């Protein structure tokens, strides 16, 4: 993969990982476009790993004070995060072992983007609650974790589904976002670690190291901006604005894929 391709995907990852528009869906679509719809010949595995690592660092930088509090006054949140992570571990392993080629399907990504947009529109009518994430029970954490597991599908936003489910569960907007991104740390970190071990074991890098480093740095910087943007818009109740992008892009991709099949 060229440096230009890596930079394009890094910018997309940095923006879409945190905005509720699905980074996996946009990366699948971008890969299909860059590879002229021949995604099997366009290996983005190693790039995908380092780009997710870059955006994971963005979460750590923005929420470092919340993470630090997990060792003290917020220690009760750790069991909630464990419960919330269990569904994505089970679904992730199953999907990767049985349906991995499907997860790189641009038509599926387009269809799921439409569903993601509908979820955001439905959620926009929910009055926000006042529950803090530290005070919620295990069942609420499990429901949010189940919502996160659906984001294994390209086009379904991890941040969008977890934040929306948190709002449904009565969390305040700020607390729904905070718990969503705390929950992302073990999910993204664990998945990235497994992929890195797999690459090391196979000793197979398809992208130059320099390109990977540049991509990770770009994803990190862009991720800082997009995460800050999402927090501001969520506080102002503008989550539904991202739905229109998902509906438009999703419909366009579905038409493109059906026409070119």
Image: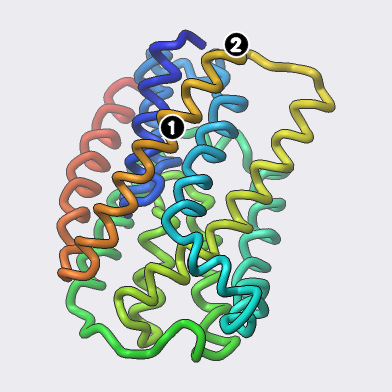
Image point 58% across, 78% down: which residue? 142
In screen coordinates, is 167 left or right of 202? left
Q: Residues within 10 Å of mark 2 (few under 14, many from 20)?
A: few
Residue found 55% across the figure and 66% down from its top: 67
Q: Quadrant of residue 212?
A: top right
Marks 1 and 2: which is nearer the front?
2
* Lower sequence index among marks 1 and 2: 1
Q: Position of residue 246 (x, y in %)?
A: 24, 48
5 vs 251, left or right, is right
Q: CA distance from mark 1 to mark 2?
A: 21 Å
Q: Residues within 10 Å of mark 1 (few under 14, many from 20)?
A: many
Q: Nearer the viewer, residue 199 or 79?
A: 79
Question: Which disc, if any, is residue 143?
Answer: none
Q: Position of residue 129 (x, y in %)?
A: 29, 88
- Residue at left offset 38%, top offset 74%: 176
Residue 155 spot, x, y in % from top left: 39, 46
* Side of 235 relative to 260 (left or right): left
Q: Nearer the viewer, residue 224 or 20?
A: 224
Label 1 sits on residue: 28
Give the percent coordinates (x, y) of residue 204: 74, 17
**Disc 2 target residue:** 208
Instruction: Report the front residue among 21 and 50.
Output: 50
Query: Circle 1 sits in a helix, a strand or a loop, which is it?
Result: helix
| CB-based contact (under 8 Å), mark 1 and mark 2 | no
**Which residue is located at x 47 percent, y 52 percent?**
61
Instruction: Tell me: residue 76, above or below residue 92.
Output: below
């Amino acid at each position: 993969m060229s440096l230009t391709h890596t930079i394009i995907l890094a910018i997309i990852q940095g923006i879409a990982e945190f905005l509720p528009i699905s980074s996996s869906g946009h990366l699948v679509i971008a890969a299909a476009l860059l590879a002229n719809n021949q995604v099997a010949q366009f290996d983005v595995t190693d790039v995908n790993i380092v780009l997710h690592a870059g955006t994971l660092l963005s979460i750590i930088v923005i929420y470092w004070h919340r993470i630090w509090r997990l060792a003290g006054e917020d220690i009760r949140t750790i069991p909630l995060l464990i419960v919330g992570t269990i569904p994505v571990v089970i679904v992730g392993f199953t999907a990767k072992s049985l349906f991995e080629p499907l997860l790189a399907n641009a038509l599926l990504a387009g269809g799921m983007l439409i569903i993601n947009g509908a979820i955001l529109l439905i959620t926009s009518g929910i009055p926000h609650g006042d529950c803090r994430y530290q005070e919620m029970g295990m069942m609420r954490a499990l429901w949010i974790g189940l919502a996160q597991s659906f984001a294994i599908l390209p086009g379904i936003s991890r941040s969008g589904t977890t934040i929306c489910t948190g709002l449904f569960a009565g969390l305040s907007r700020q607390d729904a976002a905070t718990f969503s991104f705390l929950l992302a740390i073990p999910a993204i970190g664990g998945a990235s670690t497994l992929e890195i071990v797999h690459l090391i074991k196979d000793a197979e890098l398809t992208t130059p190291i320099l390109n990977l480093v540049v991509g990770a740095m770009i994803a990190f910087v862009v991720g800082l901006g997009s995460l800050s943007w999402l927090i501001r818009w969520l506080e102002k109740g503008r989550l539904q604005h991202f739905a229109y992008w998902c509906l438009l892009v999703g419909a366009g991709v579905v038409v493109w894929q059906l026409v070119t099949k």
